[in-house]
Image (spheres, rainbow, N blue to C red):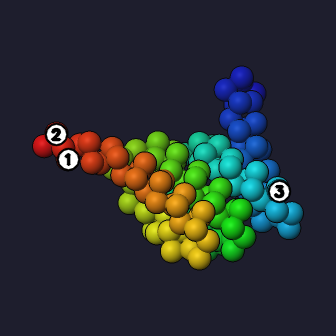
Amino acid sequence: MTSGDTDNHDETQAAATLIDGLKGPELSIRVTATQGLSKIGAALGPERTRDELLPFLAETIEDDDEVLKALAQVLGDMLDVVGGAKHVASLIPLLEVLAASEERAVREESVRSIKKVGKPIHDITKQI
């Protein structure tokens, strides 16, 4: 096993641990796992993040406000993880659901993230 293989195995193992945490019963563990979504996405790669992780999150979306707020925040930092600005559309549906939350803090964080992931597109269209 080479050093690269070991690093990849370690990343995959860390991602698996975080995924398990997303489904756990304890709130603090779910929040921590949610905050680690970028690590999961990095381990999966852009295509699997778009095709597997984001749909998984959409299907299993938590109704606990603390987890939802963490999710809204993390999604705003995942543009590179999903493959860049050309794949921004993969993040928007989940952010839209979060932006419709009853909890104000979740809505506000979702809107911040929508603005954040939309900024590169806005910058590109300004140049045209």
What secondary structure is marked by label 2?
helix
**Residue at (65%, 43%) from the top-left corner?**
39
> For the residue marked with disc 3, what is the amino acid?
Ser
Q: Name the outermost residue toward the left.
A: 128
- Mark 3 closeness class: few <14, some 14–19, many ≥20 residues within 10 Å: few
Disc 2 to disc 1, C-alpha distance: 5 Å
Q: Which residue is mark 1?
A: 125
Q: Is residue 89 left or right of residue 99?
A: left
> Which numbered tag is attached to residue 79?
none
Quadrant location of the N terminus in the rendered image: top right
Disc 3 to disc 1, C-alpha distance: 40 Å
> Of callouts 3 and 1, which one flags the residue occurring earlier in the amino acid sequence?
3
**Residue at (43%, 63%) from the top-left corner?**
92
Disc 2 to disc 3, C-alpha distance: 43 Å
Q: Name the outermost residue toward the front.
A: 104
What secondary structure is marked by label 1?
helix
**Residue at (69%, 55%) from the top-left corner?**
34
Quadrant location of the C terminus in the rendered image: top left
For residue 90, say whether it is visible: no
Q: Which residue is mark 3?
A: 28
Query: Picture coordinates of residue 25 (x, y %)?
Result: 86, 67
Labels 2 and 3 touching (C-beta < 8 A): no
> Which numbered tag is attached to residue 127?
2
> Of callouts 2 and 3, which one flags the residue occurring earlier in the amino acid sequence?
3
> For the residue marked with disc 1, what is the amino acid?
Thr
Labels 2 and 1 touching (C-beta < 8 A): yes
